[in-house]
Amino acid sequence: MAKSAINKKSKVEIRVVEPLKPDLRKYVQFGIDLYHGNPYYVPPLVYDDINTLTPSKNPAFEFCEAISFMAYRDNVAVGAITAIINRHANKKSGEKVVRFGFMDFIDDKDVVDALFRAVRVWGQHKGMNKMVGPMGFTDMDKEGMLIEGFQELGTFATIYNHPYYMKHMERMGFVKETDWVEYRITVPDSIPDKYQRIADIVARKFNLRVLAYSSRKKLKQEYGQAIFNLINDAYKDLYGYVALTQRQIDYYIGIYLGMLRLEDVCLIVDGSDALVGVGISMPSLSKALQQCEGKLFPTGWYHLYKAIRGGSDVVDLLLVAIRPDYQGKGVNALLFSHLIPNYNKNGYKFAESNVELEGNESVQKQWEYFERRQHRRRRAWKKNI
């Protein structure tokens, strides 16, 4: 984006983004261009964000409405935002919320005000009385504005934004809805003794065992559905979570389980082979996405392939889910006692926890046996409209 071409005294024009691939590509590309040269920003996969914003591609549109806006000044793009109404989430919470997400903007009061005015007006027209975000269509999308940790390399699964975003949220009268924290964890050279003892006791007491797969196809066939059923059950009481529909489950099985490095996945089952816990992690894609600028072609696929095959010393912990009747009973220790030797073998020195609700002490407690530091914090903001 050529900043010299922008006259800050010119009027800000808001345009609705048509849900067509060329228009959505411009929308996604705006955010990537805004962070050009920023060493901490990790771009999204362009085609992934386009699909998420396309009604015919994203099954969440079965119960969501959305509209995307771009701000222009002198015909130069200066901001972007998407307004979302998740009917399932609103029914669960009893609130009339319009979410905002997938947003980026230059540091300009008039631009920011125009974007949020567009979301507010659309939301009010739809009968909503509260704005919350940044959030996506569902909990599987990126959520939470970065408010601490701007000099930390971002991850594939989280939002990076400029520090001035928070200033504008406060100026517009938004207040905290909830916070998430993230940890950088040092992968130990061996399993801590106490941790291993807990894992052994839990396995014997509850007749649990670890399943490891060498075939993605077999994993999807045997436990793909069960993994997402477990996620629905384990996350049902977390802030903003709405149970995935069957169409969404089929969608995520097809997209995500096929790209995992199976050594970084662990399933825990009971004596009847019912799924009790799952841990899904993968090599960090951050540097690969920076190299390819979020594009698969012409060479982006190669950088991503190399990252997935190895070469990173960081592993991203994408999700850990434990069946509610086993939570707080040490199943996490059994899970990571299996994964840690694999992490060592694959050369991982650090693990990124990704987002955890600040009040979710049971999740954060699982890191107490490891060297760690809380290095990022992000926020969902709210405002009545």
Image: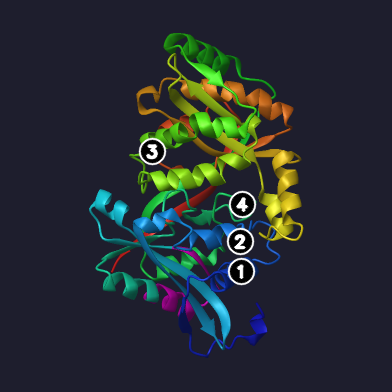
- Residue located 47% across and 27% down the image: 277
Residue identifier under label 4 = 154
Residue 10 in the image, given as x and y percentages of width and height: 52, 90
Q: Residues within 10 Å of mark 2 (few under 14, many from 20)?
A: some
Which residue range is magenta in the image? 101-117
Q: Is residue 226 left or right of residue 126?
A: right
Residue identifier under label 3 = 232
For marks 4 and 1, give the CA distance. Answer: 18 Å
Q: Residues within 10 Å of mark 3 (few under 14, many from 20)?
A: some
- Determine whether 200 is above or below 140 in the image: above
Q: Tell me which label, 4 or 1, sits earlier in the chain.
A: 1
Residue 47 in the image, given as x and y percentages of width and height: 59, 60
Residue identifier under label 1 = 29
Label 3 is placed on what type of residue? Asn
Q: Residues within 10 Å of mark 4 (few under 14, many from 20)?
A: many
For marks 3 and 4, give the CA distance. Answer: 26 Å
Which one is in front in this view, the residue at disc 4 or the one at disc 1?
A: 1
Q: Nearer the viewer, residue 230 or 345?
A: 230
Quadrant where the C terminus lies? bottom left
Label 1 is placed on what type of residue? Gln
For marks 2 and 4, give the CA distance. Answer: 16 Å
Q: Is residue 137 left or right of residue 47?
A: left
- Residue located 40% across and 55% down the image: 60
Q: Tell me which label, 1 or 2, sits earlier in the chain.
A: 1
Q: Is residue 173 left or right of residue 309?
A: left
- Residue 46 is tagged as 2
Q: Nearer the viewer, residue 353 or 307?
A: 307
Label 4 is placed on what type of residue? Gly
Let me know if residue 145 is in the magenta part. no
Label 2 is placed on what type of residue? Val
Q: Are marks 1 and 2 in contact (CB under 8 Å)?
A: yes
- Residue located 60% across and 41% down the image: 258
